[in-house]
Image (spheres, rainbow, N blue to C red):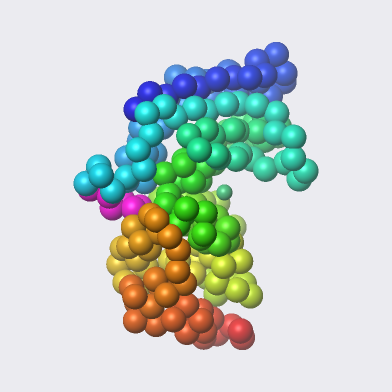
Amino acid sequence: MEFRVINDVPKTPGGIKFEKEIGIPFTKQILPKIINYIWSTLFQQNNPSERKNIDVLQVFITKIDEKPTPVGVAYGNTINISVDFIQETKTEEMKWYFTAVMLHEATHVFQWNGEWECPSGLREGVAEYAMLKANYVKPNFLKPGEGDRWDQGYAFTARFLEYCEGLVPGFVAKLNKKMRKTYNVLYFKEITGKSVEQLWMDYKAKYGKKN
Ligand SMILES: [Zn+2]
């Protein structure tokens, strides 16, 4: 796999900060480690035929014109990292936070999404779970048992997936494998023996939370 890392905005304060505090060599150095973690640990795709095949992975440090501005976005084989996020992040946290964001966005690149039938909250939950499992989250990361719905997304769904993983080790890897071509909410039951609604109720009850 070839890595292309492009600083689109080298003359802006954030672009200059990227070169000084992170840089293209560091980015190219962490990418293979992140991808290896995604394949081997997160998704347990030991056979290359199970993986999403990508020849070139592109990373742009760029201005993201969305409000509110996300720290990063991924589409196809491309990851955009917000130059505003780099500018606003404290220098001492910079490399750590950048790595965490890359982990989240790279998970989007390599996850199966049931040809986009998988709910967006589940996609975001898996990407956030990638950070949680790697222990690449801040100490104030959401505690288990919070949220209103299993597919609420991000940390809410990540904590729920962590619970499912506790019931069936490798749950997220199994779920990802099933979502290669299509998505069905029954995958939860096929893997754990319980419907997603039942799992969510059990999860809330475990942490003493009302549904
Ligand atoms: Zn995301």
Label tally: 0
Residue at the (38%, 54%) spot, across then down: 180
Location of residue 210 with respect to 165 vertically, above or below: below
Q: Position of residue 86 (x, y in %)?
A: 65, 31
Location of residue 99 with respect to 191 vertically, above or below: above
- Per the picture, the main secondary structure of the magenta-coloured stretch is loop
> Can residue 132 be spotted in the picture?
no
Dividing the picture into quadrants, the one containing residue 146 is bottom right
Q: Position of residue 36 (x, y in %)?
A: 32, 40
Dividing the picture into quadrants, the one containing residue 55 is top left
Image quarter where the C terminus lies is bottom right
2 with respect to 106 (left or right) = left
Chain part drawn in magenta: 41-46
> Can residue 89 be spotted in the picture?
yes
Residue 187 is inside the magenta segment = no
As drawn, which residue projects farthest toward the right?
A: 67
As drawn, which residue projects farthest toward the left?
A: 47
- 171 vs 94, nearest the viewer: 171
Q: Position of residue 74 (x, y in %)?
A: 55, 40
Image quarter where the N terminus lies is top left
Residue 44 is inside the magenta segment = yes
- 211 vs 207, nearest the viewer: 211
Residue at the (34%, 57%) spot, across then down: 177
Dividing the picture into quadrants, the one containing residue 172 is bottom left
Q: Position of residue 5 (x, y in %)?
A: 50, 22
Residue at the (77%, 43%) spot, across then down: 67
50 with respect to 5 (left or right) = left
Residue at the (28%, 48%) spot, across then down: 50
- 52 vs 11, nearest the viewer: 52
As drawn, which residue projects farthest toward the top?
A: 11
